[in-house]
Image: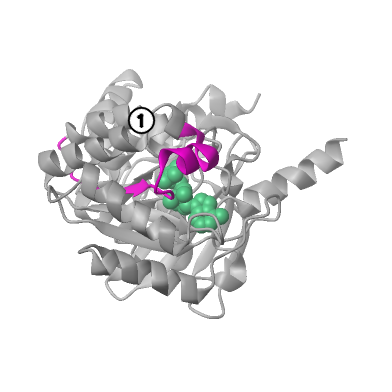
């Protein structure tokens, strides 16, 4: 096993936990604040210049900072989007995407190595879930990308590999750590969490006092079709999911964005749009504003789903708009670098499997 297993994962700790750690190695409490600031700025033990050499050595012996290593990096020539394939301390690969928006830089991060949700169109789930990420491994993606780019990241979306609400406690801890003023200081309003629809997790999240923006991956207008492409729908159907969405809005005051991936001939027809209008009217009605984000599916080679053409996308959007909903079509960033998550990890896993067999 790697040595990181026995060493303390400091980057997953909040200041109170670090204080306890300092006490356990015979150091004064105030060291905790110093270490916290340095490690959140991406500085390793050896660079922590206001602590003694002896303590730095002690930290090297007893603790570890789990920043991921860059395995591959792709920069889009079209829009400056940067995709990272990271390697974690146990050799697992995950992905993040750095995106430039007019309001600042945003990073899309992974929350699990793999995913067990089984959505039919998604590359991240093809090899199943290997393990959850620790808070430090989520934080490490933001810190390492910021360090590599030399630019501040002011927004985070949890839309990379994995289902954030399936790794609930670590994701909550991560969200509290990134919000810390002594660290990255990224406010909840600049964070979006995307879920395929774990209703129990949505209800728990509403009670956390952490008003992050919630994105719901809806992707189908009827239970029959949603269950076909998203197995989670067999556990919590559309009625239950939309009711939980309304409860989240009522509790937090945060608007919800519904993600709808358009797959040619499957869920992008005029009839599909009309069904979606009916479903939203029935279960959401006027209880909250409805915003639907349309995403032409990014075809993955393991499945034969094709992307809708722009005519169908526009027709779909027009039907929603005519019925009082807001519809946006997601701007595609980094199309030249396979920026949709899951594709690189999957390719890497295939290569390794090939080498092993
Ligand atoms: N598990 C979470 C977050 C990760 S996926 C969730 O399901 O929401 C982030 C978004 O990308 C989701 O809306 C997901 O459905 C969508 N997505 C996955 N594969 C896609 C593909 N091939 N093309 C377009 N969108 C995709």
Residue 133 is left or right of residue 306, and the answer is left
Q: Residue at x 36, y 40 (%)?
A: 52
- Asked whether residue 220 is in view, the answer is yes
* Closer to the camera in the image, 227 or 329: 227
Return the x and y of residue 8 as percentages of the image width and height.
44, 26
Return the x and y of residue 109 as percentages of the image width and height.
44, 50
* Closer to the camera in the image, 303 or 75: 303
Residue 85, image quadrant: bottom right
Residue 78 is left or right of residue 12, and the answer is right
Is residue 66 found inside the magenta-colored segment of the image? no
* Closer to the camera in the image, 4 or 112: 112
Residue 82 is left or right of residue 352, and the answer is left
Q: What span is in magenta?
A: 209-232
Q: Residue at x 46, y 42 (%)?
A: 226
* Closer to the camera in the image, 246 or 87: 246
Q: Residue at x 57, y 32 (%)?
A: 129
- Quarter of the picture containing the C terminus is top right
Return the x and y of residue 354 as percentages of the image width and height.
84, 42
Is residue 229 found inside the magenta-colored segment of the image? yes
């Amino acid at each position: 096993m790697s040595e990181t297993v026995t060493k303390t994962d400091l980057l997953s700790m909040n200041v109170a936990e670090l204080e306890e750690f300092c006490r356990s190695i015979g150091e004064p409490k105030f060291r905790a604040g110093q270490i916290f600031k340095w490690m959140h700025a991406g500085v390793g033990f050896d660079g922590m210049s206001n602590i003694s050499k002896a303590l730095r050595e002690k930290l090297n012996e007893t603790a570890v900072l789990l920043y991921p290593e860059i395995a591959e990096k792709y920069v889009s020539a079209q829009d400056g989007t940067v995709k990272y394939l990271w390697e974690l301390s146990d050799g697992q690969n995950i992905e993040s995407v750095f995106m430039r928006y007019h309001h600042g830089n945003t990073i899309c991060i992974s929350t699990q190595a793999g995913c067990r949700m089984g959505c039919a169109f998604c590359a991240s789930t093809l090899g199943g879930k290997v393990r959850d990420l620790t808070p430090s491994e989520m934080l490490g993606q933001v810190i390492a990308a910021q360090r590599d780019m030399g630019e501040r990241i002011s927004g985070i979306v949890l839309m990379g590999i994995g289902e954030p609400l399936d790794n609930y406690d670590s994701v909550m801890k991560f969200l509290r750590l990134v919000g810390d003023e002594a660290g990255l200081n990224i406010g909840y309003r600049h964070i979006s969490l995307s879920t395929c629809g774990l209703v129990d997790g949505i209800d728990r999240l509403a009670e956390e006092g952490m008003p992050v923006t919630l994105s719901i991956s809806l992707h189908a207008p009827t239970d029959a079709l949603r269950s076909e492409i998203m197995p989670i729908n067999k556990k919590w159907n559309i009625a239950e999911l939309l009711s939980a969405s309304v409860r989240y809005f009522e509790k937090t005051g945060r608007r919800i964005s519904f993600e709808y991936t358009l797959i040619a001939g499957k869920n992008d027809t005029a009839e599909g749009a009309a069904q979606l209008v009916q479903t939203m009217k029935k279960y959401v009605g006027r209880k909250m504003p409805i915003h639907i984000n349309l995403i032409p599916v990014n075809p993955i080679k393991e499945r034969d789903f094709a992307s809708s053409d722009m005519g169908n996308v526009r027709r779909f959007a027009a039907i929603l708009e005519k019925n009082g909903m807001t519809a946006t079509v997601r701007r595609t960033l980094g199309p030249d670098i396979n920026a949709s998550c899951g594709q690189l990890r999957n390719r890497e896993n295939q290569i390794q499997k090939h080498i092993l067999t």
